[in-house]
Image (cartoon, coloured by chain):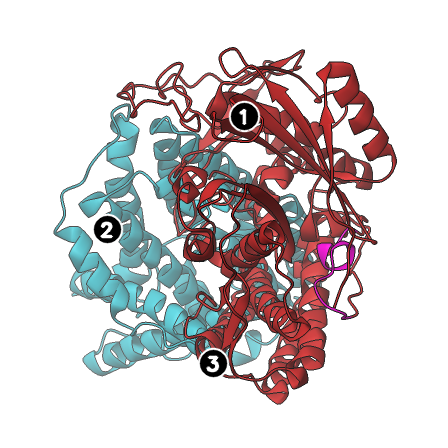
Chain colours: A cyan, B red
Amino acid sequence: MSWVVAVAQMLLVAVLAPFTIGVTKAVRARLEGRAGGRFGQPWRDLRKLLRKPPISPADAGMFFLAAPPVLMATSLIVAFTAPFVTTVGVGGSADLIVVVGVLLLGTVALALAGLDTGTAFGGMGSSREMAIAALVEPTLLLSVFALSTRVGTTSLGRIVEAGASDPARVFTPTSLLALAALGIAVLAETGRIPVDNPSTHLELTMVHEAMTLEYAGRDLAQVEWASAMRLTILLGLLGNLFVPWGVATELSPGWLAFGAVALVVKVLGLAALLAAGEVFLAKLRLFRMPELLAGSFALALLAVLASTILA
Amino acid sequence: MIDRAPTTVIEVTGAADLAGQATRLLAAGHRLALIAAHHDTAEHPGGPAIRIVYLFTAGPPDQRVELILRADPDRPHIPSLAALSFPAGRFEREMRDLFGVEPDNHPLPRQLVRHPHWPVGWHPMRHDAPARPPMTAAEPFPFLTVEGDGVYEIPVGPVHAGLIEPGHFRFSVVGETILRMKARLWYVHKGIEKLFEDKLATEAVPLAERISGDTAVGHGLAYALAVEDALGVTVDPGIQRARLALLELERLHNHVADIGALCNDVAYGIAHAHTQRIRERLFRLNARVTGHRLLRGSIRPGCVQVLEVPAIAEIKEIAGDLADIVEIALRHTVVRDRFTGTATLTRQQAADIGTLGYVARASGLTYDARIAHPLADVEVTPVVRTGGDVLARFQVRAEEAAASAALLAELLPTLAAGLFGTPPGMPGTHRSGVGIVEGWRGAIVHRAEIGPDGRLSRVKVVDPSFLTWPALPIALADTIVPDFPLTNKSFNLSYAGNDL
C-alpha cells in the first residue's frame, strides 16, 4: 500500500512540475502587464520536445549522454521518498542528508555534462554552477538541521509530522531564520532571480541554461522536466516544513486526497509568490553572489544556534 | 535661418603638407569627420586620379574644411595620418580594402572591412572593379592568443541568440575577468555606397533611410542636407524645424528602447515591459506623423512632409511616463549596483578614439552636432555625465529623452501638416556637399558628389558606430564576462551602419 502511495506521490510531482513553471511565467507576465502564456504552456513545450530526436555535439561523451537520465532519476527518487503528500511509509521515508545529496548528484551530473560538450559556454556555466552549489549546499543542510533538532531526527517525514501535530513548534525564531536561509538557498539552487535569470537569451550571463545549451529534443525535455521537478520538490519541501498542515499522517484515501490537494495548493501558491517576488528583483552581479549566499549561510547558522539555545 | 561660412577647400600636395594642415586643424579644435576616396575618371574636373577628401569640422560656429589629396590611380599611395588621429587610421584601412589605396607608414595596415574569404586584389569601389570573382569557401580565423596560467577563450557569435546583428566576439578570460576582447564585425557588407552611384540625387533618400534601420531620419536627413549643400539650395527654416522634430522623435523611440533593454539585461523585466509599451505608443505616433512606424518617407532633398503634427500633451505624457520608469529603475539598489562602475570609458580614452553621441557625452565630452552644426534657431543644451560607466550612459539616454520631449514641445507649435518645399533642380556642373546631423547614436556625416546630370557619382557615409566601436574593447578591460552583454547594450552600436 505505502509503495503504491509513494508511486502516486512521485507521479503527482512529475505532472505538477511543468505547471509550477507555467504558473511562475504566467504570474510574472501578468504582473509586468504582458499577456503571457497559459499555465499549461510548459507541458505543451515538453510534448513538442519529446517528439523530437536528440542531437549530441561531435565531441560529447558519456557524461553528456548520462546527465539527462541521471538528473531525471534523482528528481524522481526525491519525489518518491520525501514527504510531499504523506509522511507515512515509503513516501515519507527520506532522510534530509540523503535528499540534499541526491539533488546534488543531479547538479554535478549536469555540470559534468556542461564540461563534456567541450564548448566555452558549457564550461563557463558548469564552473559558475559549481561555485554557487558549493555555497548553497551547506545552507540547505544547515537550515533543515535547525528544524531537525527539535524533533531529534534527520528524517524529513518525522520533522514534517511533528510540525503538523504541534503547530506551536512551527512559529519559532528558529523556524523564521531557517525559512529565510532556506528560501535564499532554494532561489540559488533552482536558478531564479537574483542568482540566475531563467528567461534570458544572453549566453554570457547564464548559469543553469549555459550548461544545457547543447541539449535538444528528448534530452532537452528530460533536463527541463527534471529541473521543473527540482523547483517543485524544493517548493514542496519548503511548504511542508513551514506550513505542514494538510500532509497526510495516515494512509487513508481521504487523508491522501486532501494531502495531494494541499501539496498542489502550496506549491502553486509558493510559485506565484516566487514569481511576484521576482518582478521586484534584478539579477545580482556574479561577484556579489557569495555575499548573498554567505548571508543565507549565516542565517542558517543562527537558526541552528537558536534551536539549541532556545530548545 | 542659420548662416554659415562656405566649406573651405584646400588642395594639399605631399605628405608634409597634408600632415601639417591636419595638425593645424586638429590643434584648432577640429574633428576629423570623414575621409573619402574617389576613383575619378577623365570626365571629372582634374582628370583621372584617386582623390582623397579629408573633411574636418568644428563648431560652433559651424566650420568645415576639406583637404584634397590626389594619388596615382594605378598605384595609389597616400601618407598615413594614423599617427595624428586614431579615426584616420580606421578610414585609411577602409579605403585600402575598398579602393586599394595603400597608406604609407600605417602602424596597422591590416584589412578592416574585407574578410579573408574576399577575392584577393578585388577592390569593389573602384570604377574598373570587375564583377565579383568567386569567394573562397573557408576563412582562416586567426586571433591573437593570450597566454598564461588559466587563460581561456570564449568565442561568441557571429550568430547570436535573440534578434541581434551579426558580430563575432573573442574573449580571452581568466576566471570571469576579461583580459582582452576582440570584436570581428563586417559580416553585413551590402555595398551601400556603391548602390548610391548613378542614382538621381533627388531620389536616393529611401536608400539612405535604410543604411541602419533604427536611424531612418538621421541618415535620411544627413543625406538630404548633403545634396542641398551640394546644389546650393537654401531651405526654409520651417522645413528645418519639421525635420528637427522628426529627428527628436527618432531619438525618443530609440532611447526608450535602450533604457528598457538595459533594465532587461539585469533581469529587471518589469521596466522593460513598460518601455516596450511606450515604444509601441511612439511607433503608432510615428505612423500617424509620417505614415511609417520608423519615420521613413518624410524627408526629401528640399522638402519635408508631415501628415499630422503630434499633440504636445501626448509627447509630455510619454516623457512623464518614461521619467517614472527611469526613476523606479535607478531607485532599485540592485539595478543601480549593476550599472555603477561597470565598463568605464575615461574621458581621455573617449576623446582619443573619437567616440560620438551618448558614449562620448557619458564620458564627459560635450560634442553635439545639433550645437556645432545647427539647422535651425533652437536652443539645445548637451546632456553630459562624467562617470563613463553603464550608469552614465543610461542617465545620458534618460536625460536626452527628456530633453527631446522638451525640444519637441518647443518645435511642434510652429509646425503644420502638409508637404513643404520643392525638390532642387539640375546642377549643371560637378558639385559636392556635406550633411551633418546629430542622430540618436551620435553625429552622422554624409558627403555627396553629384555630376552635371544630377546623378550621384559618390556618397560617403559615416555612421557614429564606425568611430565608436573601437571604444568597446577598451571599456571592457577588467570587466567580468557576465557584464559584457550589459556593456554592449549600453554602447548599442550599429553593425549595419558600421559596415556599409
State how far apart marks 3 and 2 are (Cα).
52 Å
Report if residue A105 is visible in the image: no
Residues in magenta?
B367-378
Answer few, some or many: residues within 10 Å of disc 1's Cα (few below 14, many 20 plus, some between 14 and 19): many
Residue A85's quadrant in the figure?
bottom left
Answer few, some or many: residues within 10 Å of disc 2's Cα (few below 14, many 20 plus, some between 14 and 19): many
Answer few, some or many: residues within 10 Å of disc 3's Cα (few below 14, many 20 plus, some between 14 and 19): some
Which disc, if any, is residue B95?
1
On the image, the x and y values in percent for residue B166 come to: 42, 40
Mark 2, residue position = A221
Q: In the depicted view, which residue is nearer to us: A61 or B153?
A: B153
Decide whether the magenta segment is chiefly helix, strand or loop.
loop
Location of residue B182 with respect to B191 vertically, above or below: above
Q: Residue furthest right?
A: B28
Instruction: Tell me the amino acid under the disc marked 2.
Output: Ala
A14 to the left or right of A168: left
Dot 1: chain letter: B
Which disc, if any, is residue A304?
none
Residue B416's quadrant in the figure?
bottom right
* Residues under numbered marks 3 and 2 in contact, where contact means CB atoms less than 8 Å apart: no
Q: Say which label, 3 or 1, has the lower sequence index.
A: 1
Instruction: Tell me the amino acid under the disc marked 1.
Output: Met
B176 to the left or right of B212: right
Does label 1 lie on the same chain as label 3?
Answer: yes
Report if residue B357 is visible in the image: yes
Q: Secondary structure at mark 3?
A: loop
Which disc, if any, is residue B307?
3
Q: In the depicted view, which residue is nearer to us: B471 or B87?
A: B87
On the image, the x and y values in percent for residue B304 come to: 53, 70
On the image, the x and y values in percent for residue A161 come to: 41, 70
Task: Name the residue rendered at 60%, 59% in the picture.
Answer: A181
* Residues under numbered marks 3 and 1 in contact, where contact means CB atoms less than 8 Å apart: no
